[in-house]
Image: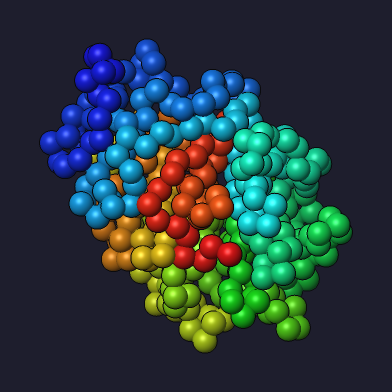
Amino acid sequence: MDMKDANRFVSGEQSRRWFLKAMAVVSVSRFAKAATPAKEKFAIGKLKDSGTRFVSFDPRFDRLVQKGAPISRLHSGCRWSEGPSWDNIEKRLIWSDVPNDRQWSWNEKSASVSVFREPSRQTNGTCYDAEHRMICCEQVGRRVARYDAQGKATVLVDQWQGLPMNSPNDVVVHPDGGIWFTDPGYGNRGTLELKEATYRIDPVDGKVERVDYSLGKPNGLCFSEDYKRMYIADTGKSEPKSLYVFDVVDGRRLENRRTFANVHVDGLVAGPDGQQVDVDGNLWASAGHGVEGVNGVHVFDPNGKRLGMVLLPEGCANLSFGGSDGKTLFMTATTSLYSVKTKTRAAHYA
């Protein structure tokens, strides 16, 4: 297959099926396999096949991404890239290489990468609060910690009802200051003493409340654009591994769980993880542990209809909007950090 024939924006059912067939042929000789060796390094820069990696199912997707926009690999060589957060004061993207116990920084002005924190206590999900303090889910110590500008840590939670947390995974902050996090147990090689669940830390008294324990392994989470709903990815044993949506009641409880979407396409299976919502309420969800043609980012409207996909040559674990204008989508995918310019921005961009 001549890649010149593939160098275009894919749109519509016929083109989508053509794309998936083409990628299946080309992936054997040109693209990374789904199971990427942990220490493999890929070339930095624009992916030469960027134009083929946008798959549209709905015209609304074409208004969210630029046709043929370059997808860039900004860094490679990690073992498992996770936990991206945009630092809008320093204009940099912070993300984690969890197994290597290191956090990295990509600087927008210099386009350079440097170590942000090492050791990082195997930090996974992160976010910033209204005072620009970084909140980290740390596998070492099984805790959620908050870091001030000088790097001093305050442990917010490491146990519940006298039992140690499993291993906090992802975290978000509500406008009232409440901190919500999931605790599925990934990274904990011992016994899980608590049922996998989602929690809220009260901003006034620091009390930790369990807000849901109905999912197998609650993983990535985010609020809707109006904070009236919460999306949570379940990566437990049930199939298909799905994204769920809950109603947020009184800013402190979750009710009315229902299935929102999954990241399976035409028999190609992947699993969801991290996600963010844009200003129009569309959910941008990572997809990984799958194969070429489904790994990357899937975009859904507020009703769960799939609008399109941004496909990556590696499984995607998490994502974050950022950049000075908030329109750059950063994607942490197995060994690498990727970015692409969009025509939208995060609903909760600071």
Write down the quadrant of residue 30 in the picture: top left
Residue 177 visible (yes or no): yes
Q: Name the outermost residue toward the left.
A: 14
Q: Position of residue 218 (x, y in %)?
A: 53, 59
Quadrant of res 50: top left
Seen from the viewer's position, the closer of residues 115 and 214 is: 115
The reply, left or right, for residue 272 in relation to residue 131 is: left
- Callout count: 0
* Quarter in which the C terminus is drawn: bottom right
Q: Write the residue at 60% across / 48% down.
A: 84
The residue drawn where x is 70% and y is 40% is 104
- Establish if 89 lies above or below 311: below
Q: Nearer the viewer, residue 277 or 45?
A: 45
Residue drawn 61% across and 53% down? 86
**Closer to the camera, 301 or 180?**
301
Q: Is residue 99 left or right of residue 306?
A: right
Residue 341, given in percent of the width and then of the height, sits at 44, 44
State the colouring used for the structure image: rainbow
Q: Quadrant of the N terminus?
A: top left
Relative vertical location of residue 141 with respect to residue 36 in this rendering, above or below: below
Q: Is residue 195 visible?
A: no
Q: Quadrant of residue 12?
A: top left
List x then y, in percent, for residue 24.
29, 23
Establish if 94 lies above or below 312: below
